[in-house]
Image (tube, rainbow, N blue to C red):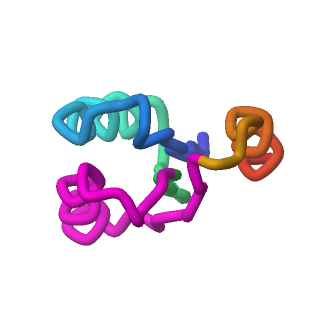
């Protein structure tokens, strides 16, 4: 089975990523890895390192957008 990992970095800690990836790998072949967040914010620095180290595609999602969760849902499909 093909599996994708889509993470809202504003709501999930970078410390949880390895566990998330291991879970996904147990379900099938991970073919997509994307992390969404406001990369202009200093607290995203740890996620930047994780994205680089694990080959995750970072996607900019500005916090000013009040309907971010709806935007993320559309972006993931």
Q: Is residue 46 above or below residue 17?
A: below
The residue sitting at 36% across, 31% down in the picture is 12
The x and y percentages for residue 13 are 27, 33
* Residue 61 painted magenta: yes
Q: Is residue 13 above or below residue 41?
A: above
Along the line of sight, which residue is nearer the eye, 29 or 70?
A: 70
Total label count?
0
Q: Residue furthest front?
A: 64
The x and y percentages for residue 7 are 48, 41
The residue sitting at 46% across, 65% down in the picture is 58
The quarter holding residue 26 reads top left
Q: Is residue 30 above or below residue 48?
A: above
Q: Is residue 69 left or right of residue 58?
A: right
Q: Is residue 73 left or right of residue 47?
A: right
Q: Is residue 3 left or right of residue 39?
A: right
The x and y percentages for residue 11 are 42, 29
* Highlighted magenta segment, given as a residue range: 37-63
């Amino acid at each position: 089975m093909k599996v994708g990992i889509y993470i809202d970095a504003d709501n999930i800690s970078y410390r949880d990523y390895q566990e998330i990836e291991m879970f996904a790998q147990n379900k099938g072949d991970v073919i997509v890895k994307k992390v969404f967040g406001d990369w202009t914010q200093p607290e995203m620095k740890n996620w930047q390192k994780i994205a680089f180290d694990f080959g995750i595609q970072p996607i900019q999602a500005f916090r000013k957008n009040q309907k971010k969760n709806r935007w993320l849902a559309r972006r993931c499909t």
